[in-house]
Structure formats: C-alpha cells, structure tokens
C-alpha cells in the first residue's frame, strides 16, 4: 500500500502526524531522522520515506502507546536480591516486551524520562519530587510496598506527599487499596506479581520434610518465628527449616548462627542467587511466611508458580494473595499456633491436600500474561 492510500483510510491519521510518526518509525534513518522533528511533514512523499525507514520484514501497526523512555526507581542496589529488586527487574522485562526503553536507578538524578515508576513512597520521595519539578505533566506511577501501606503513608509526611504527586498508584494485591485515603483510591490499581517456575521436582531426601522460609533477616519479617516453632515440634517430626535470606544487621547474623547451632531443625542458608531460590522451592514440601506486614510477597507468587503450599501470618498482604478462606493462616507472633500448623501439615494428609488445592486455585492470579496485560492497560489509561 502506498502512502496516498494510507491517507485515504478514514481515521488512520486522526492524530497529529508529529505524534504518530515516531510510533510508526522506531529506528529512522537519514532523511526520516531529520523529518521526525518537523511537525508539518504531512506530505505523502515524506510519509513514504518514514515507512521505508522501517526494517523490512518487521512491519507493525501503530502501537496502543508510543515507545516511552521509562525510569524505574528502586532504592535496592543492583546487587540486592530483595523483593523490591526482583519486582523492578521483572517490571523492566515486561515493559521492554511491550516495546519501551527502560532503565532502573536507585534514585532519579535527572535526564530524559517520559514516565517514572517509583517503588516505595518514602524512600523514593526525593526522586519523585525531582521528577515532578522537571516534568510537571509527565505520568508518574508509585508502587506501594508493605511498609508504605501499613505504616508510612499513615505517619510519614514524605510518603503522603508522594501519594499526592503520583499520577497513578499500584498495589500488589487488592486488599492494599483499602489502606489508601479515600481521596487517592480513584487513581489506584492492583496488579498481582507474576512468577515462572521450572517443572516441579519433589525433594529426594528421605525421612525429611523440607520447609522453606525465604526473606531477609529484619524485624518486620519476624525471621526466627519458624525456627522457634520448630523447637516445639514432637521428637518424631521430620520437619527441617531452611532459611534463605541475608542478615541485614550484625545482630541478626549472630542470632541466626546461634539458632542454627542449638536448633537441629533450623539451617540458615543466607543469601543465594534467585535461581537457587526457585530450585529450593521446587524441592520443598511447604513455604512459611512469618512477616508482620507485606505489600504482596514475591515468595508467595513464586511458591504458587512452583505448586508448593503456603502457610502464612494472617496479614492483608497474604490474604489478598491467598484468599480469605485459605486454611493455612496463623496469628502474627504466635509461635505455638505455627507449631501446631506445621505438625498438622506434616501428619494430616487430608489437610495437606486441602492446603495444596487452595494454592492451586489461586495460581491463575500470578500468570505472567496476566501481569503483562495489567501493565499494558495501565499505560494505555495514562496515555
């Protein structure tokens, strides 16, 4: 089809050509590059030059959203294996698959940016303010973490300021929306985190019921609750706790080593590559989450993808992912309650099957294509 025929199609060029052409031509060459800045280059011969600049064999129609330069701000360092870092990396991959250019920075320091996605209302506050001063009308998406939703936005002025400056707010599970002040709920959306997993590989260790605790050692995670509960199990129990995560203080590291030395059911593995975490999930019988607050834990999504049952503290961040009727909840800080639940999972095959069945029914929420569609819809809404 030649350029004149394209102009004849009703509605094709209803947008100003200066906005449409960059979407059509991702990698312009020669005259096409020079003409991109010319808002009056509406002559069909110029359009033909633009179309010719497309790589042959890769013709694509105008995307829903033009290619954007996106900056994801996450305070986690590039070497970190925290949940926020994993989230930032996954979102970057999804956005690149949607055709955008993405960079991840610990903080925004200026530069070209069509859209910012900031994780953590308080920690990313300076970056949010700098971006908003530089680009008052550009979209800014704020992803709210557990400490944002269940602490900071209620007590911290920097976090509340970030809510006001954001164009859109993202929570990682729908119950998090209830924590937002009513004035901000209209610009909020919930996007479940997705996860992929290799095929399920049950543990080959005989006489051992492997339980995984995955999370860095810091107070908000209540990291030693599972170890303390394991001490209360009957002598005949085969349960062993493998704890994966970095100690974020010297005191936490010392306590983890002492616990492992005195508690034969507990091993502190420490920080390992993410691939090894997935391998551990694939080889365990149960995942335990003991957190006091979560925005929507990556480990739950990964456990669901691996087909591993989960027991968790009854907090909104987990209930929003696992559902209100999930049978595997215990109260925050309840060591005895957790011990009873661990023993029941190990010894009661019917309960274990019920727990596994409930997790399988929730697995559709964390499919990668679902998260990809959600991001595509959000960007289209902000267009």
Image (spheres, grey):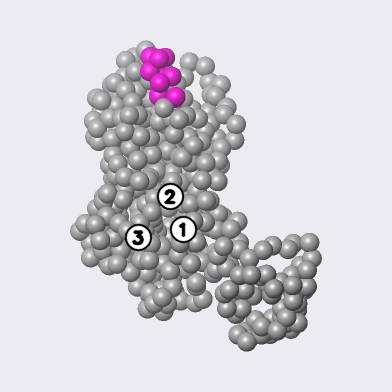
Residue pictured at 35% horizontal, 73% vertical: 129
Image marks 2 and 3: residues in contact by CB distance under 8 Å:
no
Q: In this view, does 35 lie to the left or right of 160?
A: right
Residue labelled with disc 3: 187
Q: Which mark is residue 233?
A: none
Q: Within 10 angstroms of label 2, few (less than 14), some, or many (20 or more) residues?
A: many
Residues 64 and 9: in front is: 9
Mark nearest the camera among 1 and 2 is 1
Residue labelled with disc 1: 378
Vertical order, 260 against 188 (above or below): above
Q: Is residue 62 magenta?
A: no
Residues 308 and 245: in front is: 308
Mark nearest the camera among 2 and 3 is 3
Q: Does the magenta stretch include residue 350?
A: yes
Name the quarter where the N terminus is drawn: bottom right
Identify the magenta region: 346-357
User: If you read the primary sequence from the N terminus, does the residue marked by circle 1 or circle 3 appear first?
Assistant: 3
Q: Measured from the top left, where is residue 191 in percent x and y?
A: 43, 49
């Amino acid at each position: 089809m030649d350029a004149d025929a394209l102009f004849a199609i009703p509605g094709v060029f209803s947008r100003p050509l200066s906005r449409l052409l960059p979407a059509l031509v991702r990698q312009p060459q020669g005259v096409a590059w020079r003409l991109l800045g010319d808002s009056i280059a509406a002559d069909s011969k110029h359009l033909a030059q633009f179309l010719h600049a497309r790589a042959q064999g890769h013709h694509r129609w105008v995307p829903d959203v033009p290619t954007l330069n996106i900056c994801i701000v996450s305070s986690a360092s590039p070497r970190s294996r925290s949940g926020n870092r994993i989230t930032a990396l996954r979102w970057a991959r999804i956005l690149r698959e949607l055709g955008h250019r993405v960079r991840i920075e610990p903080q925004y320091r200026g530069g070209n940016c069509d859209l910012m996605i900031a994780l953590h209302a308080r920690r990313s506050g300076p970056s949010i303010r700098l971006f908003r001063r530089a680009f008052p009308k550009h979209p800014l998406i704020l992803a709210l973490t557990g400490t944002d939703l269940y602490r900071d936005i209620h007590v911290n002025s920097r976090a509340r300021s970030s809510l006001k400056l954001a164009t859109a707010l993202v929570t990682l599970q729908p119950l998090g929306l209830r924590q937002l002040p009513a004035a901000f709920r209209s610009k909020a959306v919930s996007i479940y985190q997705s996860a992929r997993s290799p095929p399920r590989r049950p543990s080959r260790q005989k006489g051992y019921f492997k339980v995984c605790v995955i999370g860095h050692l810091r107070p908000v995670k209540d990291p030693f609750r599972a170890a303390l509960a394991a001490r209360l199990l009957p002598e005949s129990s085969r349960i062993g706790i493998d704890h994966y995560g970095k100690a974020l203080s010297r005191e936490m590291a010392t306590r983890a080593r002492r616990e492992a030395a005195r508690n034969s059911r507990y091993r502190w593995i420490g920080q390992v590559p993410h691939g090894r975490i997935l391998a551990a999930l694939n080889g365990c019988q149960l995942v335990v989450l003991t957190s006091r607050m979560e925005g929507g834990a990556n480990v739950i999504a990964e456990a669901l993808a691996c087909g591993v049952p989960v027991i968790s503290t009854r907090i909104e961040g987990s209930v929003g992912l696992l559902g209100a009727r999930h049978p595997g909840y215990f109260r925050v800080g309840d060591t005895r309650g957790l011990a009873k639940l661990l023993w029941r999972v190990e010894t009661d095959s019917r309960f274990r099957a019920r727990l596994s069945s409930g997790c399988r029914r929730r697995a559709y929420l964390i499919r990668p294509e679902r998260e990809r569609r959600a991001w595509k819809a959000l960007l289209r809404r902000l267009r």
